[in-house]
Amino acid sequence: MNTTLIQNVRLIDPEAGTVTSGSLLIADGRIAAVGAEVAVPDGARLIDGRSVCLAPGIVDIGVKVCEPGERHKESFRSAGLAAAAGGVTTMVTRPDTTPAIDSPETLEFVTRRANEASPVRVLPMAALTKGREGREMTEIGFLLDAGAVAFTDCDHVVRNTKVFSRALTYARSLGALVIAHPQDPGLSEGAAATSGKFASLRGLPAVSSMAERMGLDRDIALLEMTGARYHADQITTARALPALARAKANGLDITAGTSIHHLTLNELDLADYRTFFKVKPPLRAEDDRLAVIEALRDGVIDIICSMHTPQDEESKRLPFEEAASGAVGLETLLPAALRLYHSGDLTLPQLFRALAMNPAKRLGLPQGRLSVGAPADLVLFDPDVPFVLDRFALRSKSKNTPFDGARLQGKVRATFVNGTCVFGDL
């Protein structure tokens, strides 16, 4: 039996909500034992954790890998290396590629490329409508059979409610998860900032935070009608939270995520018109950021994601309102999230519940926990190591991070996928 014992670590258990000192035994790619006292099997490889943290590997929903179509921005190889360096053991990839992943053939191509090139797990999502154009739903059943784990048109909101309701009904009949982008597309079109005094002073085209609330209200009404499984990719405003909480209390099958950028940055970061801070939806007011953190702590919001969106220099070196939206986040997700731990907003178990356990649970995956029998997808990290981020040191092909030059705390020491070390010198 191929066994590894990781000793002398702080075990972050998001399921039990505990941080305890102990060891973890990996045997044949799975967790064989975990606790304060774990016997050393004959022939086991020993790793001294040196009192740093061991947690379930991050399951990141909403990663854009630009194959097919824009491989110069990000490939499965570069994204996989970035993920491994960031403690992300499962990338759940978006279908907003060129062309969109809307057919079993395209999905099979993506799956094959991912298996060949990525050192971490890749689970692809497929488009909900053909070409992500919102006119005709895709062959959801065939795409499920081909390996799609969820269906989404990403930031293209399905404007036609009849098309969306039919897609939700069909997805419900197959037990498929639909991921949507809650936003009123008319109000948010062309926006580069959130409405308010700051956006007006900077002369930026803006959208009211009410656009998110309106989009979510519509989707919740359709959920009541169809009974579908639904996940909101990013909830970023205080105005949307009461509707989300009511929908959960009413028993709808709804979960919600938020991006690490909306948890750790706010609209004031746009002051110098740096396009690396242009994301979709736009960065919000500080009150919204604090409300979203509180919702995460209370379980109203379930998941933290990187919303990794690579853009090349040509797409970003433009006037702010013309520049492409998006930021890379695979390598910065964990150290940025640890800001919430160091500020006292979230405990480490709460953080990994949102980063690992809840996304795995929503997708029906066995990952995301430190229980015996679970896959040994793990991240070994020191939450206290300070560093200044240099974007050119990132493993992603694109370097569009808003954290360039930022002081961060927390470094990944090693990442394990299926018990194999895919990052780290151990």
Image: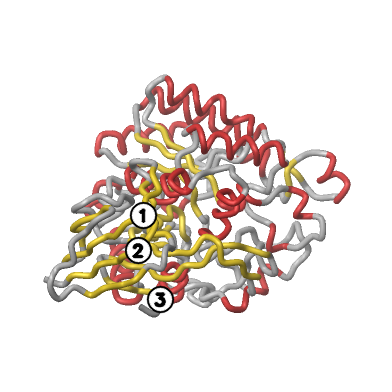
| Secondary element at image label 3 | loop
The correct choice, above or below, for 360 with respect to 417 in the image is above
Label 1, label 3: how far apart the Cα atoms are: 22 Å
| Secondary element at image label 2 | strand
Q: Which residue is mark 3?
A: 424
| Secondary element at image label 1 | strand
* Mark 1 in CB contact with mark 2 (< 8 angstroms): yes
State the residue at coordinates (40%, 57%): 58
Quarter holding the N terminus is bottom left
Label 3, label 2: how far apart the Cα atoms are: 17 Å
Identity, as a three-letter code, of the amino acid under mark 2: Asn
Q: Which of marks 2 and 3 precedes in the sequence?
A: 2
> Quadrant of residue 60 in the image?
bottom left
Q: Which residue is mark 2?
A: 8
Q: Which residue is mark 1?
A: 21
Question: Neighbour class for label 1 at 10 Å: few (<14), some, many (≥20)?
Answer: some
**Horizontal relation, residue 265 to residue 62: left or right:** right
Label 1, label 2: how far apart the Cα atoms are: 7 Å
**Horizontal relation, residue 289 to residue 27: left or right:** right
